[in-house]
Image (cartoon, rainbow, N blue to C red):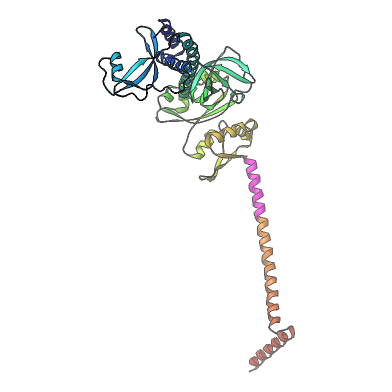
Amino acid sequence: MIKIGTALFEACEQLERERGISKEVLIASLCDAMVAAYKKHMRTKEAANIEAILDEQSGEIGVFSTKLVVENVEDPETQISLADAKEIDEDVELDDEVKIEVTPEQFGRIAAQSAKQVITQRIREAERNLVLQEFMDKKGTLTTGIIQRVENRNVIVNIGKTDAIMPQKEQIPGEYYKPGNRIRVFVLNVKETTRLPQVIVSHAHAEIVRELFELEVPEIEDGIVEIKSISREAGYRTKIAVWSNDPEVDSVGACIGPRGSRIQTIVGELKNEKIDIVRYSEDPVEYIVNALSPARVVSVDIMADDEYAHEAMVVVPDDQLSLAIGREGQNVRLAHKLTGWKIDIKSVSQMEKAEAQAFENNYDEEESDDSSNVIDEEELQQEIEEEMNQQGYDEEDLQQEDALDHNDESEEISE
């Protein structure tokens, strides 16, 4: 046995407090290191019956070989005779297992070198597993971190036991990320790597708005008010559709708060990003009207509503067209993301002009139909004449038949 003293246990307890790595993991790592060092010292790769045992009471560790008690020893590496086993333990019987210490002499230095490498590796693996488990649980949630630095347009954020990466596409356009500032981010993904797991966070994700509303609005946390949908263009504008499960609770008013206190807190957290709170409705017409606020809507016509397409035509007053579309189409684009409907917006004058044009097109089509009918009658007369000619009739025969018919009619009159 090798005496290691109490310093090892004190170091294990300190690591457990600082890094969260349990004492059992470190002791198991030390025992595995002893076995690895023994295999290297004995120049053998197979040693299934070899294990290291640490006595916490005495502070000693040793390498032991487990052997089976038999009458006739065929394999000295794995078997031991009953007589030899009785010298170790008087109560041993056949088919029992005994542990025999095989710790080499002057094994301490060799074991220490091997143990250092193995324990360092195991500590890294334990840290990686702890971080991976912790942030796998945090995936899809909001967390607070401290900005460390900016590298290659990526913002490095410390979120506890590891540093997370915020890619450029997950940053708010125009936002300045100053090292040392606290920031609230959304954990997008956790990627397992050979070293510490790589955590990807976002400051522009729409779920950040949801988390902020859940923190600031008690009715949402209690389930009275429900967030149905969110569409966001980070740094510019967000639309959020809410629904109240209690008829006595106004969903929009609950999100705004007394004198706008709740919404002002959220807007301040989002660096004065504009937020439109609209009422959700199961009626698509009403939902689209609400989603296009603050623009006024004259009418909504459902053009397609099936599993393949959801399309609607919206008519707004002439002075509301630019407001309904928004700067660079932002308002209608957010309304489309919020409702899931493809929205085509026209002003009243545009709609009247389109209807007048359609009426003219229909009138022209009717005239063309009439002219085609005339042409058809002429073609029919020509076909009749051609058929009579094919049957042996000509124009003179027709005139003679007409004369005979005329004479017959004159005779009948004279009689």
| Vertical order, 45 against 305 (above or below) | above
Q: Is residue 80 left or right of residue 134?
A: left
Q: Is residue 26 left or right of residue 401?
A: left
Q: Is residue 315 left or right of residue 10?
A: right
The x, y position of residue 213, in whole percent, is 48, 23
The residue sitting at 64% across, 54% down in the picture is 362
Nearer the observer, 399 or 384? 384
Secondary structure of the magenta portion, mostly?
helix
Q: Quadrant of residue 329?
A: top right
The answer to whether any part of residue 216 appears in the image is: no
Nearer the observer, 169 or 152? 152
The x, y position of residue 334, in whole percent, is 57, 32
Pick the quarter of the image with the C terminus: bottom right
> Where does the magenta region start and end?
347-362
Q: Quadrant of residue 11?
A: top left
| Vertical order, 233 against 164 (above or below) | below
The x, y position of residue 397, in whole percent, is 72, 86
